């Protein structure tokens, strides 16, 4: 295996050498970046990806579609035969036992060395019943399987840094939860969705949403059933566009901060419910993937006498240069305009108003978003089309309301375990599996983000003639509209003064 790599293997690479790795959530954002990094930088024997079955699509058809993404372009060039090391396992984290067949479950038990559980629903206020099945029951069931694995070297559970934001400081420990995991699982299996929805508020306690509660409950199940197992928990904060590798500015998921960045970049979002001075708790996806891989290595080096579960809070608060949510929105606008990054889908002039007061936000959203969207949809309806714009802004409003908890509160974290992990990495591993964000240049990062939005989300490689034309039309409409508004205001003032002084 070493012969396949030009240089001697690093300490982390040696841990992965000739291993079989089982990954859930591999088709999600973090999962895709993680799979790419493992296949490109780790001398694994084989990687098994849990994926939901789809009618009419065989496993290799699905693999080819997944790996056709630009994210894997460097991997394809460096290792053209990498797909020989990848297999899909049919399953679904919403089903009992992750939907694995008895034969596949037995294969995992007999052949896996490393298990990484990334799968989760990230809908912050999603149905508690469904969230329980995907985020909690699947974790418990995978723990049961992992306990029987013959050659298990490491089990990594990907949680969230916001699992315990009801604490004054989120430390790298597993906090007790008022809701036992087994109780919540039995409720979800026994009662209807409507009934569970009716008691969700009582179930949440001091947690802000179903997502954060589910992660705290799942962590407690990991602690409960993971005694004497090689386990680690990774807690990233808001995961955003890649910083360095394999390509800069890559993203797929349009929820959370990246979705807001897209809306701002297109001029579709004019107002945000954020505290502009609140630190933006974001981390690049490639650094998260490197941390998961490093956590696997750390587990194998842990003393057998140490029964604690190592936990790593991955947040920018104590390491990276200060970045606020106000700077995030301003940077996207500035980069789009300064570097003339145009898009064929631009909606309006890029500019945002930020407020932390919901009352003010509702008024501005109604004036700037809802009324114009109804006007446009009315025109579409008249010419025979369906309403399209208002439903989109309704979804946007829901996303902003879901995010407000994280955008107006200042959270504190302890990340000393992360410091320790970086300190114990060899120089080679620090370069190959970089998790240190202390030197991140946010200005450069947001420039790459703006370019990544256009290239990887909007599928526009550059400023096409149509994009330039679109920008000119939008700006002409913007200036005409503003000029008309100002003219009407001046004329109204003239009439008022004329009436008063005459």
Image: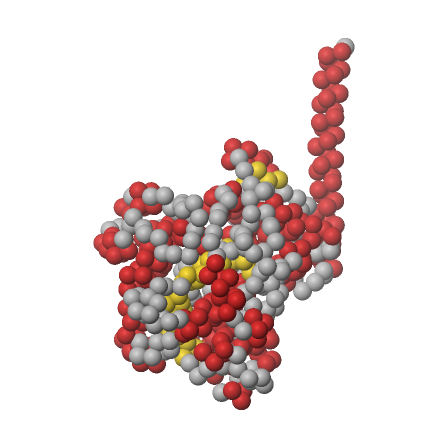
**Percent from the top left, x then y, of residue 222?**
32, 62
Vertical side of 445 occupied by 111: above or below: below
Front position in the image: 46 or 493 = 46
Location of residue 158 (image quadrant): bottom left
Q: Residue at x 29, y 66 (%)?
A: 227
Vertical side of 266 occupied by 95: above or below: below
Residue extending furthest toward the bottom: 3
Residue extending furthest toward the top: 502
User: Count of labels shown?
Assistant: 0
Front position in the image: 331 or 455 = 331
Residue 433 visible, this orientation: yes
Location of residue 146 (image quadrant): bottom left
Vertical side of 87 occupied by 234: above or below: above
Residue extending furthest toward the front: 305
Front position in the image: 413 or 329 = 413
Front position in the image: 433 or 307 = 307
Q: Is residue 162 left or right of residue 285?
A: left
**Percent from the top left, x then y, of residue 232?**
39, 66
* Location of the C terminus (image quadrant): top right
Location of residue 248 (image quadrant): bottom right
**Percent from the top left, x then y, of residue 34?**
49, 69
Residue 375 visible, this orientation: no
**Percent from the top left, x then y, of residue 144?**
28, 68
């Amino acid at each position: 295996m070493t012969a396949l790599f030009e240089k001697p293997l690093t300490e982390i690479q040696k841990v992965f050498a000739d291993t079989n790795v089982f990954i859930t959530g591999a088709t999600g954002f973090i999962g895709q970046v993680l799979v790419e990094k493992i296949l490109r930088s780790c001398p694994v024997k084989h990687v098994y990806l849990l994926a939901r079955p789809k009618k009419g699509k065989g496993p290799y058809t699905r693999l080819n579609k997944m790996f056709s993404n630009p994210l894997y372009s460097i991997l394809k060039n460096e290792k053209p035969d990498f797909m020989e090391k990848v297999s899909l396992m049919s399953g679904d984290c919403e089903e009992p036992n992750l939907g694995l067949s008895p034969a596949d479950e037995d294969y995992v038990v007999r052949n896996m060395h490393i298990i990484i559980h990334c799968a989760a629903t990230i809908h912050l206020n999603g149905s508690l019943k469904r969230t329980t099945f995907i985020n909690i029951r699947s974790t418990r069931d995978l723990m049961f399987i992992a306990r029987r694995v013959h050659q298990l070297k490491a089990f990594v559970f990907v949680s969230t840094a916001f699992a315990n934001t009801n604490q004054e400081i989120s430390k790298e420990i597993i906090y007790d939860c008022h809701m036992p995991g087994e109780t919540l699982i039995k409720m979800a299996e026994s009662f209807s969705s409507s009934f569970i929805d009716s008691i969700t508020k009582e179930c949440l306690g001091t947690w802000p949403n179903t997502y954060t509660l589910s992660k705290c409950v799942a962590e407690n199940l990991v602690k409960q059933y993971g005694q004497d197992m090689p386990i680690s928990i990774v807690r990233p904060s808001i995961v955003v566009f890649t910083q360095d590798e394999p390509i800069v500015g890559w993203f797929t998921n349009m929820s959370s901060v990246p979705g807001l960045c897209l809306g701002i970049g297109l001029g579709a979002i004019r107002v945000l419910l954020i505290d502009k001075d609140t630190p933006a708790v974001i981390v690049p996806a490639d650094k998260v993937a490197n941390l998961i891989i490093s956590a696997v290595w750390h587990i194998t080096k842990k003393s057998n006498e140490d029964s604690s579960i190592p936990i790593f809070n991955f947040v920018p608060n104590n390491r990276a240069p200060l970045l606020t949510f106000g700077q995030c929105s301003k940077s996207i606008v500035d980069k789009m305009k300064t570097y003339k990054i145009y898009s064929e889908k631009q909606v309006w002039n890029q500019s945002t108003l930020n407020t932390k007061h919901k009352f003010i936000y509702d008024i501005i959203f109604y004036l700037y978003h809802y009324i114009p969207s109804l006007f446009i949809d009315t025109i579409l309806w008249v010419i025979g089309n369906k309403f399209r714009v208002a439903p989109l802004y309704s979804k946007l409003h829901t996303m902003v309301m879901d995010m407000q908890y994280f955008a107006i509160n200042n959270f504190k974290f302890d990340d000393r375990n992360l410091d320790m992990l970086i300190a114990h990495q060899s120089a080679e591993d620090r370069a190959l599996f970089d998790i240190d964000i202390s030197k991140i240049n946010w200005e450069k990062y947001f420039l790459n983000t703006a370019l990544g939005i256009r290239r990887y989300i909007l599928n526009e490689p550059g400023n096409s003639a149509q994009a330039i034309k679109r920008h000119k039309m939008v700006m002409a409409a913007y200036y005409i509209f503003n000029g008309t508004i100002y003219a009407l205001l001046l004329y109204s003032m003239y009439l008022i003064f004329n009436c008063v002084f005459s």
